[in-house]
Amino acid sequence: MNDDGTLDASFAPGLGADGIVYAIAVYPTNSIYAGKVLIGGAFTHYNGTNLNYIARLNADGSVDTTFNPVRRPTAL
């Protein structure tokens, strides 16, 4: 959506996530990542790209391929 509540026609997610998206976070406009969106949920692909449970999207809805979250082992 645009700031005025209208639909942003430039956002084209294609197939989108192949599972449920539980969380969405939009970077603030004063961030170096302004316009990008983080999504997290029960998905392993977004628009055909292999991703596991988290993705960062560009303002146009495409996958931000520069985002590379590192999965760290949990201490026991």
Image (spheres, rainbow, N blue to C red):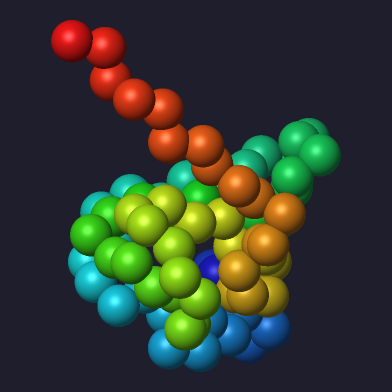
Placement of the C terminus among the 4 image quadrants:
top left
Q: Closest to the observer: 49 or 62?
A: 49
Placement of the N terminus among the 4 image quadrants:
bottom right
- Measuring from the top left, give residue 16's x and y in whole percent: 42, 80
Which residue is depicted at the point 51% across and 89% down?
14
Question: Can the viewer see residue 7 in this picture?
Answer: no
- Measuring from the top left, give residue 22's x and y in whole percent: 25, 54
Which residue is depicted at the point 66% across and 62% down?
64
For residue 48, above or below residue 4: below
Using the rendered view, name the quadrant where residue 74 is placed. top left
Using the rendered view, name the quadrant where residue 65 is placed. bottom right
- Measuring from the top left, give residue 43's x and y in whole percent: 29, 65
Question: Can the viewer see residue 75 in this picture?
Answer: yes
For residue 59, above or below residue 7: above
Using the rendered view, name the quadrant where residue 15 is placed. bottom left
For this orientation, the residue located farthest to the left is 76
Which residue is depicted at the point 44% across and 63% down?
51
Q: Closest to the observer: 44 or 41?
A: 44
Q: Is residue 73 left or right of residue 16?
A: left
For this orientation, the residue located farthest to the top is 76
- Measuring from the top left, give residue 42's x and y in whole percent: 23, 59
Q: How many marks?
A: 0
Q: Closest to the observer: 42 or 8?
A: 42
Q: Is residue 15 left or right of residue 74?
A: right
Which residue is depicted at the point 30% across and 78% down?
18
Q: Is residue 70 left or right of residue 68?
A: left
For residue 20, above or below residue 47: above
